[in-house]
Amino acid sequence: MKALDLHLHMQKLGTWVDWSKTCDGFKAGQPSADIAGIAVGWTSVLPALHQAHAAGCNLFVTHEPTFYSHMDDDPRWRETEPARRKSQLLEQTGMVVYRCHDVWDRVPDIGITDSWGTHLSLPAPSARKTYYNLYTLPPQPAYELAQRVAASVGGLDQHAVQLLGPPGKMVSRLAIGTGAITDVPTMVEMGADVILATDDGLTYWRHGTWAIDQDLPVIIVNHATAEIPGMRNLADYLHRQFPDVKVEYVGPQCLYSLVGAARSGQSQLTMVLDDLSALPAAELPSGYRLDHLHPGQEWAYTQVMADSIYPGQSLEGWFERTFSSDRQYDPQNLLLIWCDDQPVAVTAAWQADLDGQQVGCIHMVGVLAAHRGKGLGKVITLAALHQLGRRGFARAILDTDDWRIPALKAYLRLGFKPLHRDESHRPRWQAVMRRIESS
């Protein structure tokens, strides 16, 4: 195989590319070179080039520029010290660099856009536009969707995602783009109520503030993170097309690491209910039944928690750590709502320490996304409060988050009041109340 064979193949494949204007093509080396191995990477940074050379590959297929400008022809960048060192390495090794960008962005199923959707375990797109897909999902808070995205990209070395806009807003129409092509207004025009963008695909001062001003949640990942699944598929594709030549994927994944202060994040908000003696009845909607946990049903409780509170995370050992290893564990204090044989909502009538005294505690209310909006969270919370009363508790507390506005409103209606356990709580509660009043 010669390097030119790859170019001819891509020209045949990428019928949508204007080959007189594209950035795709050779960036270094001789097209006539005999190829011993192909290295595929998102970008041809120096560490990736060294890795490719050490692996015996003399053709590097990159998605992004080699010399720091879109067409690799800006003299301001070509004359910098990193560019000179890169050129020297390429000359010394005889490595050929080929850019595959405009072709692979639009290849169906295994190209950049569709590979990103597949990596995120999204369903078939409900709508398409060049460089964009729209997906219909079960209604869920934007924060939970962001958690699912974060869990999906952990294997790509991105261990958190950014979220702009209201985290508690219920969303069901997710739009994704192609790499840095994530224009927020375009995705809104497609019908999206939540956006998955990349850091190179938006500006915070324009797209970010525009999204905030219309209560539009935007999840943001690294540009490389969103394209690496497609580039890995490119490596697999080249292996199938050129079976006599070894193909390896090389180079970095997410380009940055996250560094936090020693005390990052903030404590949850706390609410207290001072009287458990006059609770209303817990009335289930038709088609559901309420029961306590029975032996052997630990899987059901854990499943609802995994799908509602900890999406995408492994809960191996969680039930034992949280409940069954506690000396006060009693399965009758763990409540579930069932729809036929499916568990759909859970919580625990648990206990906690408040100023040196044991009080009742509502331990995490989880409701599956497909069953929200039916009052199940209120019902199971009331049932747990009744159980706490039967256990002899006169008061109950719970912890929650600022963004869970529907849940906070429900707790307030049940009689819970804010409890300031941290110096940050008072101003945060003031902000919460303003949001509740305006919602």
Image (cartoon, rainbow, N blue to C red):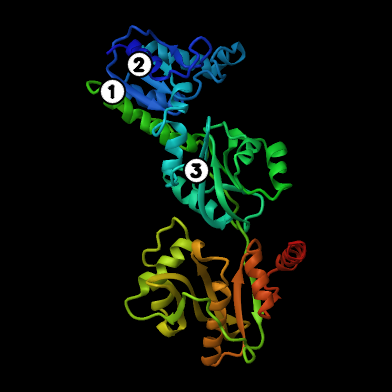
Residue assigned mark 3: 126
Q: In the rendered structure, which disc, 3 or 2, sits on the residue that comes first in sequence? A: 2
| Residue 215 as seen in the image, left or right of residue 396 | right
Image quadrant in which you'd find residue 192:
top right
Q: In the rendered structure, which disc, 3 or 1, sits on the residue that comes first in sequence? A: 3
Q: Residue at x 38, y 15 (%)?
A: 12
Element on which disc 1 rests:
helix
Looking at the image, do the residues carrying marks 2 and 1 touch, with CB atoms under 8 Å apart?
yes
Q: In the rendered structure, which disc, 2 or 1, sits on the residue that comes first in sequence? A: 2
Count neighbours of disc 3 (C-alpha within 10 A) and say few if under 14, some if 14 to 19, many if 20 or more: few
Q: Amino acid at mark 3?
A: Ser
Residue assigned mark 1: 241
Q: Nearer the viewer, residue 192 or 405?
A: 192
Element on which disc 2 rests:
helix
Q: Residue at x 42, y 27 (%)?
A: 107
Quarter holding the N terminus? top left
Q: Nearer the viewer, residue 107 or 239?
A: 107
Q: Residue at x 32, y 9 (%)?
A: 33
> Closer to the observer: label 3 or label 1?
3
Residue assigned mark 2: 9
Look at the picture and state if 214 lies above or below 229.
below
Q: Amino acid at mark 1?
A: Gln
